[in-house]
Image: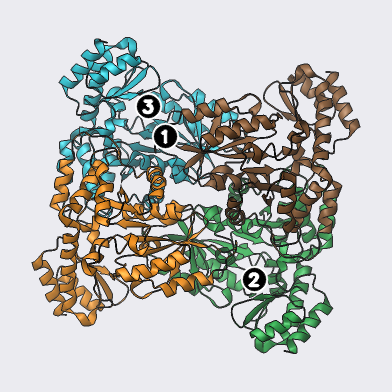
Chain colours: A green, B brown, C cyan, D orange
């Protein structure tokens, strides 16, 4: 049983159906009738006019946004454990043309306004030191913590004061909202967010993420950058179809709720072992090597997270029985 | 009836089946069991050990190869009408970090050894002028002409003499081979080609192209560059599945033959109007504005190619009847 | 006797004096009292408020300007023989992060509004083709022709209509103005020029060129880019000193007049051999190989400019007698 | 009296003489007779065959070396306080095309083999994480500490084991050697260093630093990169002249000894206030705000280094009397 990553999960049947349904001739690139519906669908969801771009990976979504928000000679404030720093092979440096990630601390990969302000204050405002241009946060974080609307708003206010654009990596945006109940609008543009990488792939999609841009004036540049990065697929209708299927009847939210519920079941099996509160679909547990071996021997697959700690990730498609067996196994350690 | 571009065509049913069949949990990125079969499958096809990478677009395939072959401070010799120059939004400049495309002439977007040699000779070998590092050709060309193995070999020999790496944009590689009957090996590595963008999307695929690397020592760098460009999909198994389906029983060749045959039927309808010989699945016709309007009024969609000229592209899925109607309509002009 | 390039000429004594005079402790970088005078000095010269940056090479001046004016995903329209295309080792690609030079034709390396407009018209306004962002001209051109204020104004008007920024490479700006008598203002910002590389090194300076920015809002970015490119010298006062010495009493104009006058003497020796009118300090002559050998044997050094053509460049410091001897030698051929 | 930075110091008279002496016509760029002597002069100094390049700034020297040693998709291990990280405006990101600086800790900005090894061990060797390619140290460090030959050798051995190239930022290389007495060879190539930025500007030069390359196969690439970065000055002879003057009779060492001696006098005035041992020409002192004000009121200029700490830097030209007055003033606090 695989609790390694939601990246490896199956694609939701409705998404597969949508892909099959898109297999008819249409205009190439994003000129098709499905792609044409994206801006409207997301504008409805976010209760404001937005521009939406499908891309094939979260890395592409993040880095196209960062490239549009940060000139090559400035910097991006983010957490030391942010995906853009740790797991994207330096893609932000590539897409921006050499902008600098400026790494901040914070428990559970969360940033506070105080930390961001202090980091800005340490930088001499001269040409010798790289000046920050963007603040980027991940919601839910790489440790499965969520930012609530109020927290994002506080960061957004600070970003504005300091002249920073504000980017949210929402690879697990659905999981965050499934927990907080915040509206998509409240946790993004109303809180000052300029661009959001809205993840669908970990949540039942195949190869479609959405880059949502809340400042329409950025859209033309992003469209060109997407093409230039080789991310304008000629049969884009198959990506649009996936996203529309996920938005339909809030499938994205239902899937995220399922994954989060599974994670809570696991978390409740061993609250004393948790190294972070479980607020989304990731569970970090203290487990010694023998215990980890035992769990693996029982058929569970997961990620070692440094010595004495493991990471489990639940997916939208993880069955009740499978989860119960995992919870029991952990309880039995 | 759409003769606008093979980019917009439907996906082949066997490819759709393969996608559906891949929808089970597997390791993420390219660690899955399908991706693991690619190197072997292409090594068989090319009769030598190759490394194969799935990517989502031809632009990505081309530019990852070019970035691995060309340092940022050197140049890429290509035809003035090459896709990398004309239709990739400057992606080669982005992926290489600023390398220069050096534009050559040649009828039908074909390059000859003489043209390439003359271009090299015009460059002063000093630090003030950009020195070429790569020769890139497109097969079939942007005007639907094919390079035969002997022609590629002559270019490959020149490339070697001049210290140039050799890249082939094979967005329509299948169409070229369907015409020439050359073996994949003879028209690539045996002719000196270092890397091939092997197109499947125009030929019945959904979002999977293959970048084939004939110099295994380049593979590690390309793997990193693919990730860094946001082109390492987390559910890569769905791309591998498409490519394997296309390779199975030479579906790629069957599809290309069908498209080429359709093009020949159209070409034979008006040989006196052809501006280039029809050697693959593209037909360029002299047509005045009235004639073009008439053809459109009859329900045919195509691309205006400058004043008095149109481009028609046939696809693997274009029906016999549809083609006959187009041929008749052209004959009737 | 060296007529190879004005690049190799000696430094004017007043510039050497200014360097010696700057050798006292002062604030580093451009915080010194001499650098502080540059903006004012050039604002006086150009009759408007400008921002001026010293840099060590024309390549740096050109490419810092281009990087500020052209995003990485757009293009720079310039002549096929422009220095930025031919002799800067791809520096525009490096500084801009991969922007594309779009090469235009024109006799004597001059561009006309018609040529520029036609080039713009050939580009499809979509994301697949690189859109131009900047027009760059060289004055005097690489063939020693000058743009008069009216000509620049016509180009500037077109640039504005097409949404293009306008850059002038003025490596030999002084030579151009010495010929036309135009005011610095008329041939730059009044004609629509946004940034000028104002050359001093070929004209008696040691290592100081000035980048003049007519849109003050670009200045902060250029200051950062200069530092980031390693072009913010710690003892910048020595560069400022040179430029101030060149501006003092219009030494820059006097030197250019001397060089131009020398060129005219040579040109008049063989008007029938000229391949371009001599409007600045470069002379292009038809000379067969024997004649060229003869001239070299007589002690004159110059550049072969393709078969049957040579280039001679005169400098501010070329003596009357030396010039007369060259003129006689040419006359005697 | 200025103890702000050695960057602002005067140029040594012998260097000024050399500049004056170079003011005759010679071949442009680095084709002149003085530039031609650099490789030999440095090969003698380093007791092996090296390639030497003049450049105008330390940033250019550092970043040209790093660009040649580190591909855009890899990383450079350096101290958190390294000049390349803190004071070069992101130039490493620009020159390398987006490579990542990986920041390490260490007292006084010194790195130990243990720290470097631990940093390497923390990086997963996969395509998701940026892999390091270069180790860069500064000698003397940004806090005025020196690496002795044995220390560099230990780092060099580790670099080799880990497959890292090894770069030394020697903006104050002379000051380091003046203290350690190590031979230039022992502290560089014999210890495994691949490229050295050999600083002259802080030590009596005007605008000439030398980039010394101990792996001759890198030289051609660096020559092209220098041109491409706008750092190939047309009158390069004036830079070569400065460097040759500095090498003549070991003026570089004499100047550094003078600056170091001055620093020691100051340090001995208040050993209990030193926050770092004074091993070169920088002195970091604990001083409260009142004391700092007092010192400034007495005519001494320096840099505030965070609350309660100041930095003083001595230069080659600082007079005995001036130094004594500073020492007395500090003693008197």
- Taking B201 as reference, is D103 left or right? left
Question: Are dots 2 and 1 in contact, CB under 8 Å?
Answer: no
Q: Is residue D73 visible?
A: yes
Question: Which of the numbered marks, if any, corresponds to residue C141?
Answer: 3
**Where in the figure is residue C239, as x and y percent of width and height?**
25, 45
- The mark lying in front, picked from 2 and 1, is 1
For mark 3, give the secondary structure: loop
Q: Chain of mark 1?
A: B
Quadrant of the snapshot with the N terminus of chain D: bottom left
Within 10 Å of disc 1 (Cα), the crowding (few <14, some 14-19, many 20+) is few
Residue A200 picture quarter: bottom right
Residue D120 image offset from top left, x and y in percent: 50, 69
Q: Which mark is residue B125?
A: 1
Question: Dot 1: what SS?
Answer: loop
Q: Residues within 10 Å of mark 2 (few under 14, many from 20)?
A: many
Q: Residue at x 88, y 27 (%)?
A: B325
Marks 3 and 2 belong to one chain: no
Q: Quadrant of residue B309?
A: top right
Mark 2 to mark 1 CA distance (whole Å): 54 Å
Query: Residue A140 — which label?
Result: 2
């Amino acid at each position: 049983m695989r609790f390694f990553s939601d990246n490896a999960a199956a694609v939701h049947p409705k998404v597969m159906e949508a892909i099959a349904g898109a297999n008819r001739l249409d205009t190439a690139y994003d000129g098709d009738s499905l792609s044409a519906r994206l801006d409207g669908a997301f504008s409805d969801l976010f209760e404001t006019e937005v521009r939406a771009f499908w891309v094939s990976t979260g890395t592409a979504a993040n880095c196209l946004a960062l490239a549009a928000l940060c000139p090559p000679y400035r910097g991006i404030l983010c957490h030391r454990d942010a995906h853009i720093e740790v797991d994207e092979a330096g893609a932000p440096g590539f897409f921006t043309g050499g902008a600098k990630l400026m790494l901040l601390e914070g428990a559970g990969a969360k940033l506070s306004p105080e930390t961001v302000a202090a980091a800005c204050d340490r930088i001499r405002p001269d040409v010798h030191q790289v000046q920050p241009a963007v603040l980027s946060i991940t919601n839910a974080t790489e440790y499965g913590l969520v930012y609530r609307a109020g927290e994002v708003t506080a960061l957004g206010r600070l970003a504005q004061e300091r002249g920073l654009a504000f980017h949210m990596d929402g690879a697990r945006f659905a999981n965050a909202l499934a927990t907080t109940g915040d509206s998509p609008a409240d946790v993004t543009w109303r809180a000052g967010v300029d661009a959001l990488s809205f993840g669908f792939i970990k949540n039942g999609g195949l190869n479609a993420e959405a880059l949502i841009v809340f400042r329409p004036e950025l859209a033309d540049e992003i469209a060109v950058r997407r093409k230039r990065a080789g991310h304008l697929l000629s049969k884009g209708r198959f990506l649009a179809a996936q996203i529309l299927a996920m938005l339909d009847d809030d499938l994205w939210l239902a899937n995220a709720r399922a994954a989060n519920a599974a994670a809570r079941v696991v978390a409740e099996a061993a609250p004393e072992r948790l190294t972070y509160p479980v607020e989304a679909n990731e569970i970090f547990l203290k487990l010694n090597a023998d215990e980890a071996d035992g769990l693996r021997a029982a058929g569970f697959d997961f990620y070692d997270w440094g010595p004495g700690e493991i990471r489990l990730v639940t997916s939208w498609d993880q069955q009740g029985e499978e989860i119960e067996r995992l919870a029991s196994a952990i309880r039995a350690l």
